Amino acid sequence: MTPYVLISPYFLLFAVFGFFPLAFTLWTSFQKYELAGEARFTGLDNYVKLMGDADFWNAVVNTVGIFILSTIPQLILALLLANALNKRIRGRLFFRLGVLIPLVTSVVAVAVVFTQLYGRDYGMINWVLGFFGVDNIAWQNEKWSSWLAIATMVDWRWTGYNAIIYLAAMQTIPKDLYEAASIDGATPRRQFWQITVPMLRPVIIFTVFVSTIGGLTLFAEPVLFNNGTMSGGSTGQFQTVAMYIVEKGFRQFEYGYAATVAWMLFVLILIGVLLNYSLVRRIGGGR
């Protein structure tokens, strides 16, 4: 019984803080559950309503759009940055520690600084673009501009985190492989694509999973980009699904409907993880 006793705390905590909330949310999604009045079972009514909810699908499009703009550049930059930090360069430890600075910075501070950078009238981004003849852009007013601004916040904060993970994995690759490749005349670029990337495939899959979950549950950055409101702009141009859940559940007190949206987000994450897993396996040469 000793092994079961030793691992039981994890399963007890998961049952209380993991399984029970999942089960309760699922039960709530089949209810008309509001702040005033008792819960009333409505079956699949919430799900049928959700399928025709234009605001929900707008939030899905926004979430997926920001996710694509942030995750793909983020992981590519992290891989290239890790490869550079794996070289013998002067001050290597300093640069390795430096890439983690954005991660330890408060997300509130990051959002405030980037909101100022993307200001329409006095933002530094528009000031730089002005030298190239570009008129001031109202970054919060359009989908493409708000998505891009939020994506840069996410990239700046999490690229270093993924780079350190890749760097740790790169250091476990046997040096003999690179020495043999050099003897055979392989260039550093070819060694990177033919040795480093295939050997990192399990780690890349892990970072894709984590980035997919984080990207599809994006909340803090777009909320702070809109001064703490859940609307995601005047027309919901950058409202994410997580923001929509909070708006429905804790602003309009439609708990049953918010639980339905939460389960649909869960399904969306599963689909995203499976698609990305399939893509990464193909790129990495997996079967």
Image (cartoon, helix red, strand yellow):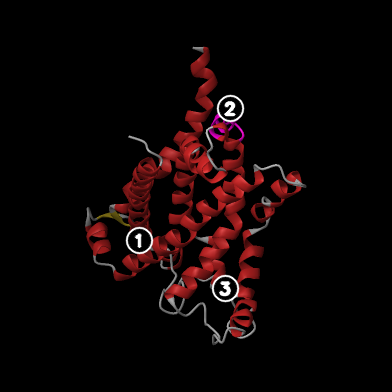
| Residue 176 numbered mark, or none | 2
Percent x, y of residue 197: 49, 41
Return the disc, 2 or 3, that comes first in the chain's sequence.
2
Contact between labelled residues 3 and 1, with CB atoms less than 8 Å apart:
no
Mark 2 lies on a secondary structure that is: helix
Amino acid at dot 2: Asp
Percent x, y of residue 189: 54, 46
Left of 53 or right of it: where is 124?
right
Mark 1 lies on a secondary structure that is: loop
Q: Residue at x 58, y 53 (%)?
A: 159
Contact between labelled residues 3 and 2, with CB atoms less than 8 Å apart:
no
Q: Residue at x 55, y 54 (%)?
A: 77
Return the disc, 1 or 3, that comes first in the chain's sequence.
1
Q: Residue at label 3?
A: 227
Mark 1 to mark 3: distance in Å?
32 Å
> Comparing marks 1 and 2, which lies closer to the viewer?
2
In the image, residue 55 lies in the stretch drawn in magenta: no
| Dominant SS type (magenta) | helix
> Comparing marks 1 and 3, which lies closer to the viewer?
3
Mark 1 to mark 2: distance in Å?
70 Å
Q: Residue at label 1?
A: 37
**Range covered by the magenta-colored residues:** 171-181
Location of the C terminus by quadrant is: top left
